[in-house]
Image (cartoon, rainbow, N blue to C red):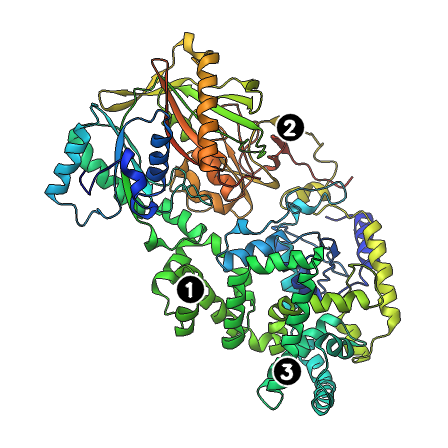
């Protein structure tokens, strides 16, 4: 199948960049929750054959081969997918967030974006399948944390920023934040309650001071926090009643918007916790029910991931500003944030060699300068293995733009309203742009209407759902179900995609 | 004025929750002085469950005042036509309804709140399902020769210095439901000049033939032409600008042309401007 030369190329590429960053999940969550960082690099290393295969399955990429080093590189500019999910979960509506089209608009440097449908899932997978080290790290760090709290308990309260800084010395600051807050919660239950409440209020005071100073960066955080005021309430609720997390059950199951029937059922039958009814009575019942469902799921994975790990996301949300402050004061410059590997932490305990950071920076710069190979999915992969078999044709059809965006997927023709199975990642071909097909929209990544203008009901709904769409305006479509095309709805083009390595 | 039928002229006295989004907007249009086919709205307080013979009679009496043979019966849900969500095409619309079919058409409209397609839309947009209540609009059906939609901003690029008009022969239903590809005019809002015209592709049109909606072939003379004279276009632009100013946001307007007279059928905010 794979020629020796191709295998070698792959292995060289991956091994060269393999010495990278492993706190994939943390990193992903860090950069992908609403954050002012616009240009962060995250490299997720998926280092078991199972994760690689799972990843391949998630992007519908049947991989019949194993590499010695199984790594996959994921570049995030803005994490569109995450924001979307967050917004969806908290009932903000997808469009509350001004999210970028980074994922659907390949740029010259990132032609593989559109193929990389669910990087978020890849990274989750990376962390989910490595549960053990988290506990070990916790065990190692616990004495240090206890000493730290003991010390602060006996002296004057320290400002949180410097507390975290001190604690983070030598370890990943993200890890430090997660741990510190985790321990903070524990200590709250004991003797430090009053004192640390004061510390937290210091953070808030510090933040609002920054906001007052009209600093552009903090201003944008402020706006985000306004948008997310409901989210904060949910976070408080979660902090009280469970830890927000996702287990592989959720990971593998359809997204909320992919299973409206289920959500509807939950919303109609769910016994909502009383607290949810009281605190979130203004939220639609659907959202409350979703939240209850998430909590239920979260409780499953406590054992899997370790308590502190689960709290990371909400912790990071709460103290991101402080984190960034620390990050910028670290050895690294600007907005570059690096994450250490579990192995590095395990090998050296909590004290990391500063050289690792230097090495990390070097790797980062190399990665930036590297042109990554395109990620090939589905049947296109066969062409890669047998490059001679299929000559490449650039077939392009000009059509009417209806809802902007760019996406790649497999064509799937809908002829009946009762169509039951639609493969994930499909670009649907629909007879017209009437609303009677709109219940299919959310099961697709893109839409091609055989008829209809840009103001028809279907066109409006496609734009509301932010699904790229075009109209053939009665023209013939020279492609058929099963073919992979790139739908460039912004430019009004359908391009038969031929992804061989160039 | 009966409480179960509120004529467009009286709509502003009621809340949006009472008359629904679409009817509320129609009330505004009526008072703005643009040409709206006469009609009334049956408010959300009237439902499938409390519909009595007395209310039915009130509806028929109000319908008689519209002095028309055929009606259009349309939804005006409380969630519809808001700034955030259009609910475009999610509920039942009946065109060419005769007096004796009116009550049935109204009932159908109520029932469309529970169809699975609109449920999906509600779930997708996190609108709690039981919260949708439906008012119903009864309006005189204009015997449309040519109909269309106009956006006071470009629907795809979001350019607010443009007006984009789509039009096609017959009732607008074929066009709004995306079954025909209309002729498109792109107009510069400030200079009011047509900067681009993209011919449509229309082989059939939808017409009302004695209460029955029929697809008939568009005759060859009409196929490559349209009745939008410079005067009509300028009239349309004037109305559109007026409407946009009144509502304060870019609007999605349905219009129709009969005997060279322009009617505005509805206006709602454009959702999802880039």
Q: In this view, does A172 lie to the left or right of A448?
A: right
Q: Name the residue under label 1.
A: A289
Q: Where is residue A180 in the image (x, y as percent from the top left)?
A: 68, 78
Chain identity of mark 3:
A
Tags 2 and 1 touching, CB below 8 Å: no
Mark 2 lies on a secondary structure that is strand
Q: Position of residue A191 (x, y in %)?
A: 61, 91
Q: How far apart are marks 3 and 2 (CA)?
A: 62 Å
Give the residue at x 54% y 43%.
Answer: A466
Q: Distance between the residues labelled 2 and 1?
A: 45 Å
Q: In this view, does A232 lie to the left or right of B142?
A: right
Position above or below: A452 against B270: above
Mark 1 lies on a secondary structure that is helix
Viewer-nearest of discs 2 and 1: 1
Can you name the residue that lies furthest to the left here? B53
Q: Residues within 10 Å of mark 1 (few under 14, many from 20)?
A: many
Q: Which mark is residue A196?
A: 3
Position above or below: B222 against B165: above
Q: How far apart are marks 3 and 1 (CA)?
A: 33 Å
Position above or below: A322 against B228: below
């Amino acid at each position: 199948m794979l020629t020796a030369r191709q295998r070698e190329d792959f292995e060289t590429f991956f091994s060269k960049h393999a010495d990278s960053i492993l706190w994939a999940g943390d990193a992903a969550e860090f950069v992908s929750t609403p954050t002012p960082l616009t240009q962060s690099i995250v490299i997720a290393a998926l280092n078991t054959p199972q994760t690689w295969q799972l990843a391949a399955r998630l992007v519908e990429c049947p991989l019949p081969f194993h590499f010695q080093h199984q790594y996959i590189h994921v570049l995030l500019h803005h994490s569109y997918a995450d924001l979307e999910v967050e917004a969806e979960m908290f009932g903000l509506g997808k469009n509350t967030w001004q999210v970028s089209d980074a994922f659907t608009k390949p740029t010259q440097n990132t032609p593989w974006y559109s193929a990389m449908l669910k990087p978020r899932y890849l990274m989750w997978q990376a962390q989910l399948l490595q549960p053990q080290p988290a506990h070990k790290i916790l065990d190692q760090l616990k004495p240090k944390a206890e000493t730290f709290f003991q010390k602060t308990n006996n002296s004057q309260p320290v400002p949180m920023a410097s507390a975290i800084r001190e604690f983070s010395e030598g370890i990943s600051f993200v890890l430090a934040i997660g741990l510190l807050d985790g321990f903070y919660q524990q200590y709250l239950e004991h003797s430090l309650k009053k004192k640390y409440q004061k510390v937290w209020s210091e953070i808030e005071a510090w933040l609002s001071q920054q906001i007052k100073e009209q600093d552009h960066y903090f201003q944008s955080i402020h706006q985000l926090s306004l948008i997310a005021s409901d989210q904060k309430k949910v976070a408080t609720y979660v902090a009280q009643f469970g830890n927000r997390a996702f287990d592989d059950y959720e990971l593998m199951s359809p997204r909320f918007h992919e299973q409206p029937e289920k959500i509807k059922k939950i919303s109609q039958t769910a016994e909502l916790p009383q607290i949810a009814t009281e605190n979130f009575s203004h939220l639609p019942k659907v959202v409350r029910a979703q939240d209850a469902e998430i909590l239920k799921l979260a409780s499953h994975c406590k054992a899997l991931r370790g308590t502190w790990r689960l709290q990371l996301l909400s912790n990071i949300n709460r103290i991101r500003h402080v984190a960034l402050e620390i990050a910028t004061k670290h050895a690294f410059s600007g907005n570059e944030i690096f994450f250490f590997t579990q192995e590095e932490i395990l090998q050296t305990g909590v004290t990391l060699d500063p050289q690792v950071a230097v090495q990390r920076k070097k790797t980062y710069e190399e990665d930036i300068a590297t042109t990554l190979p395109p990620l090939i999915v589905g049947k296109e992969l066969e062409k890669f293995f047998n490059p001679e078999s299929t000559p490449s044709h650039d077939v392009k059809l000009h059509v009417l733009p209806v809802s902007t965006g760019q996406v790649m997927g497999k064509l799937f023709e809908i002829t009946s309203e009762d169509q039951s199975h639609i493969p994930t990642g499909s670009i649907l071909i629909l007879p017209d742009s009437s609303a009677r097909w709109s219940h299919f929209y959310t099961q697709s990544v893109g839409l091609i209407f055989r008829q209809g203008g840009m103001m028809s009901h279907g066109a409006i709904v496609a734009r509301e759902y932010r699904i790229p769409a075009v109209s053939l305006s009665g023209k013939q479509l020279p492609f058929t179900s099963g073919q992979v095309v790139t739908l460039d709805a912004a430019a009004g083009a359908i391009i038969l995609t031929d992804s061989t390595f160039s | 004025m009966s409480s179960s039928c509120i004529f467009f002229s009286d709509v502003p006295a009621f809340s949006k929750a009472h008359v629904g989004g679409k009817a509320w907007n129609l009330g505004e249009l009526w008072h703005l002085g643009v040409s709206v086919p006469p009609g009334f709205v049956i408010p959300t307080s009237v439902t499938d469950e409390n519909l009595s013979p007395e209310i039915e009679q009130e509806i028929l009496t109000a319908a008689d005042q519209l002095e028309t043979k055929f009606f259009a019966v349309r939804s005006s849900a409380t969630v519809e036509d808001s700034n955030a969500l259009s609910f475009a095409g999610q509920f039942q619309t009946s065109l060419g309804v005769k007096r004796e079919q009116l009550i049935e058409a109204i009932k159908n409209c109520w029932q469309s709140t529970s169809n699975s397609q609109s449920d999906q839309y509600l779930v997708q947009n996190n609108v709690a399902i039981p919260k949708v209540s439906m008012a119903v609009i009864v309006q005189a059906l204009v015997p449309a020769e040519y109909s269309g939609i106009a956006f006071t901003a470009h629907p795809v690029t979001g350019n607010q210095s443009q007006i984009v008009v789509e039009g096609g022969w017959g009732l607008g239903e074929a066009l709004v439901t995306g079954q025909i590809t209309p002729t498109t005019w792109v107009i510069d809002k400030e200079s009011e000049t047509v900067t681009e015209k993209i011919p449509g592709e229309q082989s059939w049109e939808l017409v009302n033939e004695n209460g029955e909606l029929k697809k008939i072939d568009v005759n060859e003379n009409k196929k490559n032409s349209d009745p939008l004279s410079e005067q009509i276009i300028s009239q349309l632009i004037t109305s559109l600008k007026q409407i946009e100013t009144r509502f304060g946001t870019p609007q999605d307007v349905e219009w129709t042309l009969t005997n060279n007279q322009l009617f505005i059928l509805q206006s709602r905010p454009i959702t999802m401007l880039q």
